[in-house]
Amino acid sequence: MGALLSVQAPAITQAHLPTVHFAEKPAILSVQKNTGTDGGEAELLSLRDLLETRCPSIFTEFKPLWWLFNGHLQTIYCVLGDFSKRDHMTYRRTYLRVADGGTLGLDFAPVDQSSVREDAPIVVVQHGLTGGSYEPYVRAVLSHACAPVEKGGLGYRAVVINFRGCAGVPLTSYRLYSAGHTDDTRNALAYIRHQFPKARLLGLGFSLGSNVLTRYLGEEGPRTRLHSVCALACPWDLKANNHGLLTSFLGKHIYSKGMGGNLQNLLRKHIESLTGDPTHHVAIAAKTAVGLNNPTLADFDQEFTRIAGGPPPHFPFPSSEEYYVWASSDKMIPDITVPFLSLNADDDPVVKHVPMHGGENGFVAMVLTKGGGHLGWFQAGDGFIDRWTTRPILEWLKLMGEDLAAPTTTTTQESKAPPKLFVDEEGWLREEGRSHLGCKELSETIVEGNTGESGILQGL
């Protein structure tokens, strides 16, 4: 435990500005001269100028609470803290059946959308490793983004894409999810776009969800359905960061085993769904994984994720290390074609390797704060514990959702647009040219998104 508390006394009180990296030639974007207006006069500004003038909080100091003075304490408070009294959220959940038989849970907010304008931007959230829409780091943003403008909010819609088996979503196929598989994201975005054809879709990812969104952007290039992405605590290079966890005592025995245990407990909740056919290779892997003794994240990934984390031809992988190389998102950065903001902390005990060069992509801004841990960034609020990241994220969402000028479509751009959507004769929503994809709405329910899942640690 010495490493948990070890810090030189002066470092506790020192605060430093974040390191912010832009490409040598930042992207030039068209924005409304008067913020929040639509159809008014536009001007051209670089991504750097836009962030400096319209997202000033990104460049402010993060000053941690005095008793959460290092990355370990920030991260552990993220897991053990009581966040039940703030940022309450209620969602309308839509269950989607996807083409391979799996089920996704899309949690929409606000529940009553009668007063939300038809073209209001939608914040599309992908959560962390075993989380869901209930996560405090999700609610800290959405409670403000989805609040009405007259109450100080942005007046936006939001939807959290709960991974298969997470946050009460049933597991209905021989497949879980992973850091690299992006087809569930594609299906969810197709459904959201079909429901709200006039709205901008603004991606917001946390940890594993950041990795998935980044990979999606790189794979899609100009055909992405997302207008922008903000990625928090993205693990980037999975092989290098996993190695970093396993080569330190706290990394291996606290964080890696905490994440491995979370995945194992999640798997136990769905073991009957995965073992209906005991001869299936996923059923065999599931039985092995639930029988592991206090597994690290790498142990679990070796026995299960590399096998059941996605479809062929990529899965199964020969080893977890080969899966990590394939699923890493750092190599996708050069192919991003929409504004992208990354936020990481320099003392994150889970993510130690951050590609601050940003692939020298003009659309990318990389931010590294002095302190903050993994998904922490806890500071003193006005009578409560606040997160430093909340204000920069909200400023970014407003910039991307309202201030960025609406793009005009040319014939050339149409050839690079997202695949067209259609509903087939059996009621499946599909994308042209992607026969393996498809989704169908199953049912809806109301979800109180303020408490976590039993047996699953929050904040990871």
Image (cartoon, rainbow, N blue to C red):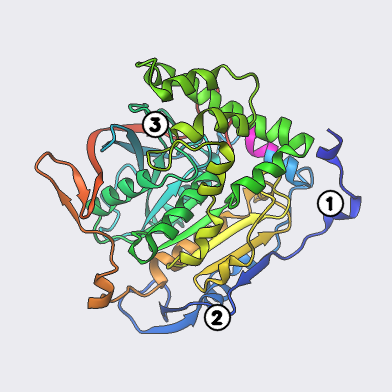
User: What element does badge 1 sit on?
Assistant: helix
Amino acid carrying label 3: it is Arg
Residue 322 versus residue 259: which sits nearer the camera?
322
Q: Which one is in front in this view, the residue at disc 3 or the one at disc 2?
A: 3
- From the top left corner, tell me how far across and down residue 139 is, in percent: 50, 44
Q: Quadrant of residue 413?
A: bottom left
Q: Residue at x 40, y 72 (%)?
A: 404
Q: Is residue 57 visible?
A: no
Q: Are dots 3 and 2 in contact, CB under 8 Å?
A: no
Residue 424, label in figure: none
Q: Which stretch is magenta?
A: 76-80
Q: Measure the alpha-carbon separation of dots 3 and 2.
A: 42 Å
Q: CA distance from mark 3 to mark 1?
A: 45 Å
- Is 88 situated above or below 283? below
Labels 3 and 1: the sequence-earlier one: 1
Camera-nearest label, 1 or 2: 2
> Can you identify the residue that label 2 sits on?
25
Residue in the picture at 29% in, 68% down: 416
Residue at the spot of label 1: 12
- Which of 439 and 315 lies nearest the eye of the viewer? 315
In the rendered view, does 8 fall on the left or right side of 223?
A: right
Predominant secondary structure in magenta?
Answer: helix
Q: Residues within 10 Å of mark 1 (few under 14, many from 20)?
A: some
Distance from disc 1 to disc 2, alpha carbons, whole Å, reads 36 Å
Q: Earlier in the sequence, mark 1 or mark 2?
A: 1
Q: Circle 3 is placed at which residue position?
A: 175
Residue at 50% over, 59% down? 332
